[in-house]
């Protein structure tokens, strides 16, 4: 009797393990390089040209500010001996203010350029995401991984285990 129980436990274990491996192997996973796909999509060249033109415009403004700063700094250095204390301090504040404006412009320009590019690319990226999701659903893929970035681009709806994991870890 004891031997029969052991055989039954082993048989059940084998069935469970084979069932799990069948379930795991039935899950379909695909991958795609989204950067490569994006480069191939129509409209990307146009977006790139617009972004480069805008970057040139920002760079020209930045260079104009730098030129103005250099001119005022050189003028100040050359003539500061002739300035009264009040005028010297005023010009120093003016140069410092211009330097701060240049730094602020540089930071804002970088952020603005990224936002501009994202705004222009957003419809193209959305179209690519939709196509990836459509293909994944049509072909029965549960997960699509981005081989260029190592991220999941599509996942079949599943249970969010975050609350369970948080409880297990004692996180509220």
Image: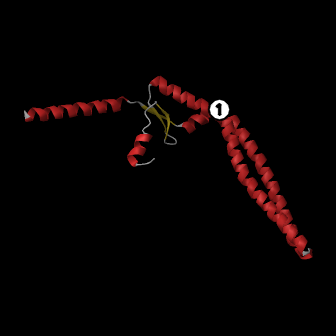
* Scheme of image coloration: secondary structure
Horizontally, is 40 left or right of 146 in the view?
right
| Residue that extends furthest to the front in the rendered view of this protein | 172
Decide: is 154 above or below 110: above
Residue 24 location, x and y as percent?
34, 33
The answer to which quarter of the image holds residue 49 is top right
Q: Residue at x 23, y 30 (%)?
A: 15
Residue 127 location, x and y as percent?
60, 29
The residue pinned by badge 1 equals 123
Please say whether residue 99 is visible from this viewpoint: yes
| Residue that extends furthest to the bottom in the rendered view of this protein | 81
Asked whether 88 or 127 is in front, the reply is 88
| Residue that extends furthest to the left in the rendered view of this protein | 1
Residue 164 location, x and y as percent?
40, 41
Local secondary structure at mark 1? helix
For the N terminus, which image quadrant? Answer: top left
């Amino acid at each position: 009797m004891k031997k029969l129980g052991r055989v039954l436990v082993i048989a059940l274990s084998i069935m469970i393990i084979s069932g799990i491996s069948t379930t795991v192997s039935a899950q379909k996973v695909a991958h795609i390089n989204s950067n490569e796909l994006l480069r191939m999509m129509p409209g990307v060249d146009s977006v790139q040209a617009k972004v480069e033109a805008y970057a040139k415009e920002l760079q020209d403004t930045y260079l104009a500010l730098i030129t103005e700063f250099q001119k005022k700094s050189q003028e100040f250095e050359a003539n500061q001996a002739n300035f009264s204390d009040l005028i010297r301090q005023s010009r120093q504040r003016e140069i410092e203010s211009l330097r701060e404006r240049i730094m602020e412009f540089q930071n804002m320009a970088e952020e603005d350029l990224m936002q501009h590019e994202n705004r222009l690319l957003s419809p193209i990226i959305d179209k690519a995401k939709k196509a990836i999701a459509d293909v994944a659903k049509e072909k029965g893929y549960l997960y699509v991984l981005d081989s260029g970035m190592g991220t999941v681009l599509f996942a079949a709806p599943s249970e969010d285990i975050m609350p369970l994991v948080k409880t297990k870890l004692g996180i509220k």
